[in-house]
């Protein structure tokens, strides 16, 4: 079989190792919570967080590529490639990859987003060398054979069908298209049936070589680990693949985005024979680098982030119009989204939308009460800490931070930023974000007369 892995040159391992740079980014207490970064000469970054009190470790590799890096014809290529990296390398078959981690009771998976992709394995701390070897081998030595592309195509088409059978999931893709139109951010991460059917092994290989260079990658590990040992093992795995030969290579900077088209007052309806109507009403949010994102997080929590939130109380508790209703934010490099989701009986959709729109308008003009803001600060602080109670969450935090921001923030710093949010800051961001004219995405069995009334919610 022909390998499409990185090609080695005559440069020796000692030459490569000589210029590795290590920094302590966050100092923990007695070694607990210490975050370090080593940058290898090939531009590969390795970040770790040490947590000696656990018996597990999570190892991941983050790639600086997502669905927004695809052309229309390549829509779905990033996700397709995610599947293919599990199909075999020069050293391992697909069965070898899965059985190696299964045999030690570990778990391995991957996910693709709009702006990044992550591959990871969670194992006992004693099995971390195995996880490092397997995941690094997948990322540097994938074969991407035509027979695997053909076989996996059916799997991905089934995944698309599964998503389309879940309107509560599919409506968020529809809302992204409503807001961003036919742009990379507006297209689904999975691609479409037509684009997936059109992708070839050659095109996916070219995509792989372009976006999986070490300068585009961040290695992250968290748990009962030793930073220097992880660096040695990762370096050995990448050198074996010939991937660290460019001694002058520098890591790719965090994505700064580009001009993204956003719409207002747009309505998209997808007719489906479902028991519920699924709606997302929303508007532009904030970029992930915007300092006001902390105030927006408090606003989101108070408005639709829990059982005491306004939307939950007004829509579900007081009127019983929906089982699931919540608000959410999505931040990208250059823009963001703020959305409100609800699932309800089709006959109730206009009542639900009116209540949601009225609450958004009320908060935009009058703001939240001090009690609501104080409760939201406490809820957001607690959920932030509780969400970082396992090594997988810690790996996600340091890996994504390195890739998307290029910096690390301690949990105490995060809690400090949340606690420092003032009522005036929340009211200001509410007026700006919620003051936009919203757009609307709906999936359900609405009749023509009902559909015509949907524009009332965005007028």
Image (cartoon, grey):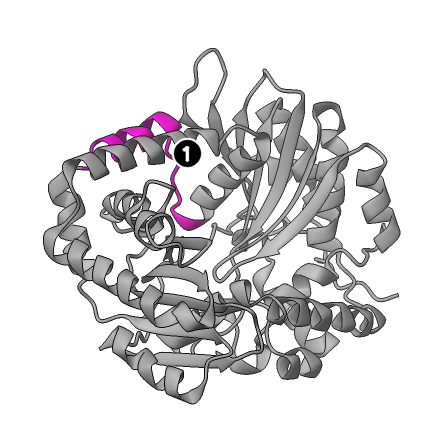
Q: Position of residue 152 (x, y in %)?
A: 77, 68
- The residue wearing badge 1 is 383
Q: Quadrant of residue 46?
A: top right
Please tell me which residue lies in front, 145 or 278. 278
The residue carrying pointer 1 sits among few (fewer than 14), some (14 to 19) or many (20 or more) residues within 10 Å by Cα, namely: few
Task: Identify the residue at the far top of this view.
Answer: 30
Relative to 270, is 275 above or below?
A: above
Task: Establish if 158 lies above or below 58.
Answer: below
Magenta-drawn segment = 404-421
| Residue 258 image position (x, y, % from top left) | 34, 68
Q: Is residue 321 magenta?
A: no
Observer-nearest residue: 268 or 124? 268
Residue closest to the eye, 11 or 29: 29
Q: Is residue 442 left or right of residue 102?
A: left
| Residue 254 appears left or right of 13 | left
**Is residue 60 shown left or right of residue 31?**
right
Picture quarter with the C terminus? bottom left
Secondary structure beneath disc 1? helix
Residue drawn at (82%, 47%) of the image: 98
407 drawn magenta: yes
Residue at left offset 41%, top offset 21%: 27
**Residue 161 screen position, x and y as percent:** 67, 72
Q: Residue at x 52, y 73 (%)?
A: 70
């Amino acid at each position: 079989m022909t390998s499409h892995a990185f090609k080695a040159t005559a440069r020796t391992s000692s030459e490569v190792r000589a210029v590795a740079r290590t920094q302590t980014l966050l100092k923990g207490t007695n070694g607990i919570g210490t975050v370090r970064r080593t940058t290898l000469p090939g531009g590969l970054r390795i970040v770790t967080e040490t947590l000696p009190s656990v018996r597990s470790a999570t190892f991941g590799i983050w790639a600086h590529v997502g669905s927004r890096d695809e052309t229309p014809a390549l829509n779905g290529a990033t996700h397709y490639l995610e599947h293919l990296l599990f199909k075999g390398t020069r050293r391992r078959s697909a069965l070898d990859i899965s059985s190696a981690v299964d045999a030690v009771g570990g778990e391995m998976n991957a996910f693709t987003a709009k702006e990044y992709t992550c591959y990871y394995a969670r194992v006992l701390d004693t099995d971390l060398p195995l996880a490092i070897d397997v995941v690094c081998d997948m990322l540097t030595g994938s074969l991407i054979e035509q027979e695997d592309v053909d076989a996996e195509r059916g799997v991905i088409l089934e995944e698309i069908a599964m998503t389309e059978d879940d309107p509560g999931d599919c409506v968020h893709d529809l809302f992204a298209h409503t807001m961003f139109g036919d742009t990379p951010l507006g297209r689904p991460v999975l691609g479409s049936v037509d684009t997936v059917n059109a992708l070839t092994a050659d095109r996916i290989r070219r995509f792989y070589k372009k976006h999986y260079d070490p300068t585009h990658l961040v290695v992250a590990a968290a748990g009962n680990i030793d930073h220097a040992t992880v660096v040695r093992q990762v370096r050995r795995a990448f050198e074996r693949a010939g991937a660290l030969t460019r001694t002058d290579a520098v890591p790719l900077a965090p994505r700064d985005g580009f001009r993204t088209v956003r719409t207002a007052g747009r309505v998209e309806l997808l007719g489906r024979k479902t028991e519920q109507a699924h709606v997302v009403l929303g508007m532009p949010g904030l970029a992930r680098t915007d300092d006001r994102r902390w105030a927006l997080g408090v606003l989101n929590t108070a408005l639709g982030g829990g059982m005491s939130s306004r939307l939950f109380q007004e829509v579900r508790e007081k009127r019983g119009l929906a089982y699931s209703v919540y608000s959410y934010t999505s931040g990208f490099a250059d823009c963001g989204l703020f959305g409100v989701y609800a699932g309800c009986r089709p006959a109730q959709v206009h009542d639900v939308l009116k209540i949601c729109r009225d609450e958004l308008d009320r908060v935009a003009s009058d703001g939240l009460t001090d009690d609501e803001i104080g409760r939201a600060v406490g809820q957001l602080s607690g959920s932030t800490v509780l969400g970082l109670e396992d090594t997988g969450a810690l790996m996600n935090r340091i890996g994504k931070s390195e890739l998307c921001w290029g910096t690390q923030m301690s949990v105490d710093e995060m809690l400090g930023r949340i606690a420092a949010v003032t009522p005036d800051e929340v009211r200001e961001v509410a007026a700006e974000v919620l003051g936009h004219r919203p757009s609307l995405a709906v999936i359900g069995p609405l009749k023509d007369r009902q559909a015509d009334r949907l524009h009332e919610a965005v007028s």
